[in-house]
C-alpha cells in the first residue's frame, strides 16, 4: 500500500518518516515539487519484503496508478498494468487475508519446514497477537531467501 502525501519543502528529499501507527515505519520517496509543495510517496518499510515474497510465490506484484481508482459499489479497485487484472491492491502480508496465501504456499515448500515449525497456526491466526506473529513469519521467510543469496 502506498499513500501519496504532500508536505512542505522544509525537509530534505528523500527523508524517512516514522509513522508508528501499526508499528511499521513509513519511507517517503520524493516524486516531485509543485508550487513549493513536495509530493511524497509513502511506502511502508515492508513493501520490499512483500514484493519479494509475492514474486517468489509466482504472483504478479501489481503495477497501477493509485490516483486512478475505478470506483465500484463500495471498493476502490485498479487495473494492473502488468497482468491486466482487476485488483484491489498488492499483498500486505501483515493482513490476515493476504497472509493466508503466503502461509499455504510456505506449507508446500520443503526448505521452509523449519520456519513453519517455529510458528503455531494458533499464534499466526490469533485475534490479538496474530499480526505480530504474521510479521515475524513473513520476515523470517524473506530473511531465509535473502541470506541464501548472500545479502543480509
Ligand atoms: Zn498485476
Image: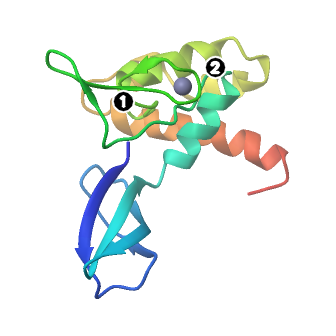
- Vertical position of residue 14 compared to residue 133: above or below: below
The mark total stands at 2
Q: Which residue is mark 1?
A: 95
Ligand 1 position by quadrant = top right
- Which colour scheme appears in the figure? rainbow
Is the CB atom of the residue marked by disc 2 within 8 angstroms of ligand 1's nearest atom? Answer: no
Residue pictured at 28% horizontal, 88% vertical: 10
Residue pictured at 75% horizontal, 39% vertical: 145
Question: Could you say which quadrant of the image residue 6 lies in?
Answer: bottom left
Is residue 115 in sight in this rendering?
yes
Question: Where residue 146 sits: x, y (%)?
Answer: 75, 46
Disc 1 element: loop
Residue pictured at 73% horizontal, 17% vertical: 109
Is residue 25 in sight in this rendering?
no
Which badge, 1 or 2, is on the more N-terminal residue?
Answer: 1
- Vertical position of residue 14 compared to residue 127: above or below: below
Question: Where residue 120 sits: x, y (%)?
Answer: 49, 21
Give the CA distance from mark 1 to mark 2.
16 Å
Callouts 1 and 2 close, C-beta under 8 Å: no
Front residue of 52 and 76: 76
Q: Which residue is mark 2?
A: 106
- Characterize the local packing of mark 1: few (<14), some (14-19) or many (20 or more) Cα atoms within 10 angstroms: few
Disc 2 element: helix
Q: Is 55 positioned to the left or the right of 32 in the image?
A: right
Which of the two marks, 1 or 2, is nearer to us in this view? 1
Front residue of 114 and 60: 60
Residue pictured at 83% horizontal, 44% vertical: 148
- Vertical position of residue 106 compared to residue 53: above or below: above
Question: Where residue 115 sits: x, y (%)?
Answer: 65, 29
Q: Is 147 positioned to the left or the right of 80 in the image?
A: right
- Vertical position of residue 150 compared to residue 117: above or below: below
Amino acid at each position: 500500500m502506498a499513500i501519496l502525501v504532500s508536505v512542505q519543502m522544509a525537509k530534505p528529499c528523500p527523508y524517512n518518516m516514522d509513522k508508528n501507527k501499526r508499528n511499521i515505519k513509513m519511507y517517503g520517496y520524493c516524486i516531485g515539487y509543485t508550487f513549493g509543495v513536495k509530493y511524497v510517496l509513502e511506502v511502508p518499510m515492508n513493501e520490499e519484503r512483500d514484493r519479494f515474497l509475492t514474486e517468489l510465490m509466482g504472483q504478479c506484484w501489481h503495477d497501477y496508478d493509485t490516483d486512478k481508482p475505478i470506483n465500484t459499489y463500495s471498493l476502490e479497485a485498479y487495473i494492473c498494468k502488468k497482468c491486466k487484472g482487476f485488483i484491489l491492491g498488492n499483498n500486505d502480508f501483515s493482513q490476515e487475508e493476504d497472509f493466508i496465501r503466503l502461509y499455504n504456499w510456505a506449507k508446500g515448500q520443503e526448505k521452509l519446514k523449519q520456519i513453519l515449525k517455529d510458528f503455531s497456526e494458533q499464534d499466526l491466526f490469533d485475534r490479538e497477537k496474530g499480526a505480530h506473529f504474521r510479521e515475524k513469519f513473513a520476515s523470517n521467510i524473506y530473511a531465509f531467501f535473502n541470506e541464501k543469496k548472500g545479502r543480509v
